[in-house]
Image: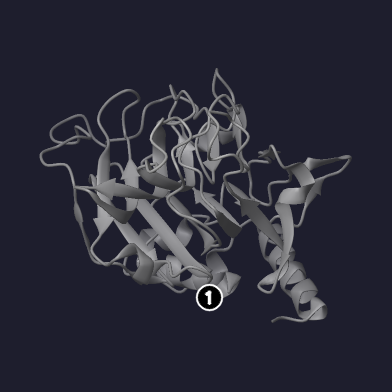
Amino acid sequence: MRSPSADRRRCAALATALAVGGTLAALLPAGPAASTASVPVRPVAHYDFGHPVPGDPARERDRGTSGTAIELVNGGAAMRVRDERRGSVLQTRQRSPEVRTNDDWKAGVYGPGGVATLRAFNAVRGATVMGWFRLTGENPAPNSHSADPADRYGAVGLAGVLSGTSQGHDVRALLELITVDGVLKVVALGRRVDGAGSQTFAASADWRTILPPGRWVHLAAAFDFDTGTMALYRGGRPLPGAYVVGGDPWGVAGPPEPDTASPSDPRGIKIGGSYPQNTREGNPCHCRMDDLMFFDRALDGREIARFHRWTR
């Protein structure tokens, strides 16, 4: 466990790196493509759950470039909990499994006309979602919308960027556990065009091996909307996997080029479940999270490995 002084040094180094020169490019090793060296790699949004909005502890400040504060839904400040990883982290969970309700602890932001501060994800060529996750309870959770007490949700929500027409569930880029052919898998799920088909890249390994209950694990999902490819990483290393949907669900074949996401502002970010506007419970995650980051391009493996080491 890091000492408080070590944690303060880490935060100070982070703040300096983000402020000086406006880029983290100098912190990253040179990749195989020279073009990546000139691209700023600051996250569009970054939440470490140690920075409540002044005067409003039920909201968390954004440490990224966009300044997009998020709501700690249904639990407020109580969702920031002490953890051996460091000072405070986010706790999400289902609260009333036997009742059809929307009182689950989750986080995020939602705007029915789009969230303007997330405009970096408008017509974007790629995206990356990453963070630290620790499963702390029953997953997947009992389905509170089902009359069958044995019924479970078919997914466990981690973190994602909503699409431009989302009702609070549909996404542009998502890291999640989802049922694929009857088996729960760690997946990257992306949607290039609002309202159109999504593609899923599912890790081959058992989800309990990737995310052992009670253990902190760094996961990342990268989405390249131009090439139609996705990738998953655990602990900074690629996770073998396979695409779930055949054909070309993103519609990237043929002109025009390059292929980008829809030219719309995302309707928000969802964390620990769906519907950040709190109209419904959906796929709650009984887990803790820290250092959630959302980037407006598909980071390569070296960059993701560096962020894993940096936040560890």
| Number of other residues with Cα within 10 Å of mark 1, as a class: few under 14, some 14 to 19, many 20 or more | few
Vertical comparison of 232 with 46: above or below: below
Question: Residue 32 location in percent, x, y?
Answer: 32, 69
Q: Quadrant of the C terminus?
A: bottom right
Res 29 visible: yes
Residue at the spot x=61%, y=33% of the render? 109
Residue farthest toward the right in the current orientation of the protein = 55
Looking at the image, residue 114 sits to the left or right of residue 220; the answer is: right
Question: Residue 91 location in percent, x, y?
Answer: 64, 54
Q: Quadrant of residue 146?
A: top left
Q: Quadrant of the N terminus?
A: bottom right
Residue farthest toward the top in the current orientation of the protein = 113
Render colour scheme: one colour
Looking at the image, residue 248 sits to the left or right of residue 83; the answer is: left
Res 69 visible: no
**Mark 1: secondary structure:** helix
Q: Quadrant of residue 256?
A: top left
Question: Residue 97 location in percent, x, y?
Answer: 53, 40
Q: Residue under label 1, please give it.
A: 309
Please give the count of numbered marks on the rendered protein. Answer: 1
Residue at the spot x=52%, y=57% of the render? 41
Residue at the spot x=38%, y=35% of the render? 148
Question: Residue 253 location in percent, x, y?
Answer: 14, 36
Amino acid, disc 1: Arg
